Amino acid sequence: MRISLAIFIILIGISLLTYRNGLRGEFMHEDTAYLLSSSFRVPAGAMKDALLPRADDNFYRPLTRIYDSWTYQRFGENMLPHRLINIICLALTGVLVFLLVKNITSHTGTGLLASILFCVHPINSTPVLYVAMPVMPYATFFLLSLLCYTDFFERRQRWDLLILSGLFFALSFLVHEITLCLPVYVFLYAWQLRGSGWRTAVLHTFPYLLIALAYLIFRLTFVSNTMDVIGLTGYITEENGVTVGSLLCTIIRNIALYTGKLFWPEGILWNLRVADQTHISLPWLLSPLAAAGALIWIFRRSWRKSIDLFLILWFVCGFIMLAATSFVHPSSGIGIEPHWFIASSVGFFGLTARLMIRLRETRLSDRIWKAGLGCVVLFLGYFTNTYTLRWQYERPYLQYWLAHDPSADLPNFWLALIYHKEGNHQLAATLYCRALTGGYIDWEVYYNLGNIYHQNGFYDKAIGYYNQAHRWNPDSSAVHHNAAMSYFALGNARRAEELLLRAQKFDPESTTVRDSLEKVRRYLESHE
């Protein structure tokens, strides 16, 4: 317990130093949108309502919604407490990294070094800087579940540890569903690392599979758009130039892009992606087979109970859920959000720490080794600090994002919102058009383009864009309301009244819709 507390204090100090620029700044558009939405959906006196699935929500992440509501209701848009909580979560997760890697490697120094690398590497900076929809807790629960299981494995009589492990596993996918791959880790730990028979490994994995199956049945039954299979099959078409083979190439290239950022952390983004492949590239398609062949050759004589191989498999298994996660909105294409792999990145950091400790045990001078280690930590800390500085304010961060990925829809859309608010309608319209990718934000793009034309008096064009927005999101009260006001400006008060009644149906509490409806009805009464 004392050593864990000491590690926590060390990691808190390192994290505060690394993320000091993140303690001030402004909220991103996505932060505000999620926080306000979550705060509206989960009132202060009804937190239990967050456990109920919603028909209009593509995800079932009740713990995230409760956390968002609680923090926003207490801290509002004061950045400091939000980021401090995230830094504390990072350090706590770092302590779990230390304990788990120490259990796996039986080496305290390896666990400590892995936890430091975990906290200072910029690949894990998004969960600290991104205030809304916190994902660090999923890694915390994931690692707690594995830690309890590893303790249970070593002390079979402690069945309470197995129960705790299952509980933490269940809590983890109430934060993020990517943790469903945990049963694979349990099987590998028992079978590959500890050398148990496959029957024993399957028996240990079975309770976790039952929990995962129960969750999947619940998601498929009660939560909309669990995985947009129709969108996925529609995405793989000759019209899009996408085949199953080219899709696999795109996924492999994205994995390679993410892995490369672990070694050289320059140009890390909130969403990493490469252009979608429209043809099959044989070298990319065969690269996983080549990597698997290399691992088989390296570990051909010692693959059972090999710690190095287990850490490699830990890292690789994080990509099991990639295809499903990427295709929540398949029309947006394949992409990787680095925070999906917080838990699996522990395998990379554990292996790196193990190799560095092994290097110390050679004839290398202890002074040189310490200097090299310090340089590595400072190098990673510098990149994280620089990235944190870019994240302070929304406009420069979005410009940085577009410099690395000009065709990305989200930064174009969010930057357009900034210029729209400032009154630069021409530049805003240009950026809105760049954000049209056939993805899930298209309705908002059309809606805002309609607002620009409405504000400039081009009501016919505004109605055209509102109609486009309606096709993507027919249940939006805002779309119906603004289209109604464009019709009203053109003198078609009857059509305006009809649309406002629909808007009121979708949002009965809206005072804006109510006031506009009264205004239109007064006009109609005065002209009868």
Image (cartoon, rainbow, N blue to C red):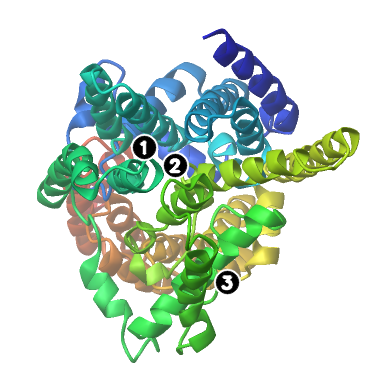
| Circles 3 and 2: CB atoms closer than 8 Å | no
Residue at the spot x=20%, y=30% of the render?
51
Count neighbours of disc 2 (C-alpha within 10 A) and say few if under 14, some if 14 to 19, many if 20 or more: few
Count neighbours of disc 3 (C-alpha within 10 A) and say few if under 14, some if 14 to 19, many if 20 or more: some
Residue at the spot x=31%, y=86% of the render?
237
Q: Which residue is mark 3?
A: 407
| Near-viewer residue (321 or 469) | 321
Q: Earlier in the sequence, mark 3 or mark 2?
A: 2
Percent coordinates x, y for residue 76 in the rendering: 50, 23
Q: CA distance from mark 1 to mark 3?
A: 27 Å
Count neighbours of disc 1 (C-alpha within 10 A) and say few if under 14, some if 14 to 19, many if 20 or more: some
* In front: label 1 or label 3: 3
Q: Quadrant of residue 140?
A: top left
| Near-viewer residue (363 or 268) | 363
| Circles 1 and 3: CB atoms closer than 8 Å | no
Amino acid carrying label 3: it is Ser
Q: Which residue is mark 2?
A: 33
| Circles 1 and 2: CB atoms closer than 8 Å | yes
Q: CA distance from mark 1 to mark 2?
A: 6 Å
Do we see residue 94 in this rendering?
yes
Q: Earlier in the sequence, mark 1 or mark 3?
A: 1
Percent coordinates x, y for residue 319 in the rendering: 42, 58
Numbered mark located on residue 37 in the image: 1
Do we see residue 177 in this rendering?
no
- Looking at the figure, which quarter contains the C terminus? bottom left
User: What secondary structure is marked by label 2?
Assistant: helix
Residue at the spot x=61%, y=37% of the render?
118
